[in-house]
Amino acid sequence: MQVSPPDPDDATPPFEQLRAQIASRAASGDLPAGTKLPTVRGLATELGLAANTVARAYKELEADGVVVTEGRRGTFVASSSRAGTPAAEAAAREYAAAARRLGLTREDAQRLLDRAW
């Protein structure tokens, strides 16, 4: 698995940059379901990061349902996309409701989402 090292000039914490990169690749299918991720230590060494940084990214990914950890077998990309999950749908509804309360048009809300993405 090829992952880019976090950008040291980015204000986003390194674990979050790593988490977002893996989640995006899993959602796009670039990391298909069942793909085994490198060990925490292996990826940390490869990227020049502390093992705790990679461990936190993996923990967040697991909490989001993007990956599953199977003990000594390792960490794998989960078998289902999270885009259609109840949690993702609830988050989308909450954002849409907040945007409407603020008087935003759909285009304005989409533009803000694109910028935040």
Image (tube, helix red, strand yellow):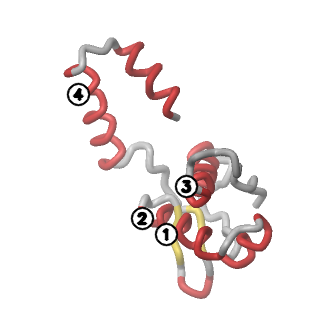
Q: Amino acid at mark 4?
A: Ala
At 24% from the left edge and 20% from the top edge, which residue is drawn?
Answer: 102
Q: Which residue is mark 1?
A: 59
Give the mark, 3 or 2, whose residue is nearer the N terminus: 3
Q: Amino acid at mark 3?
A: Glu
In the picture, the disc for residue 97 is: 4
Q: CA distance from mark 3 to mark 2?
A: 13 Å
In the picture, the disc for residue 16 is: 3
Nearer the observer, 6 or 42: 6
Give the mark, 1 or 3, whose residue is nearer the N terminus: 3
Report if the CB atoms under discs 1 and 2 are less than 8 Å apart. Answer: yes
Give the mark, 1 or 4, whose residue is nearer the N terminus: 1
48 left or right, relative to 11: right
Q: CA distance from mark 1 to mark 2?
A: 6 Å
Residue lying farthest to the bottom in this orientation:
72
Nearer the observer, 80 or 99: 99
Which secondary structure, mark 4? helix
Q: Amino acid at mark 1?
A: Lys
Q: Which residue is mark 2?
A: 63
Question: Where 87 sits versus 89, above or below?
Answer: below
At 56% from the left edge and 46% from the top edge, which residue is drawn?
Answer: 27
Q: CA distance from mark 1 to mark 4?
A: 30 Å
Q: Examine the image and state in which quarter residue 92 appears.
A: top left
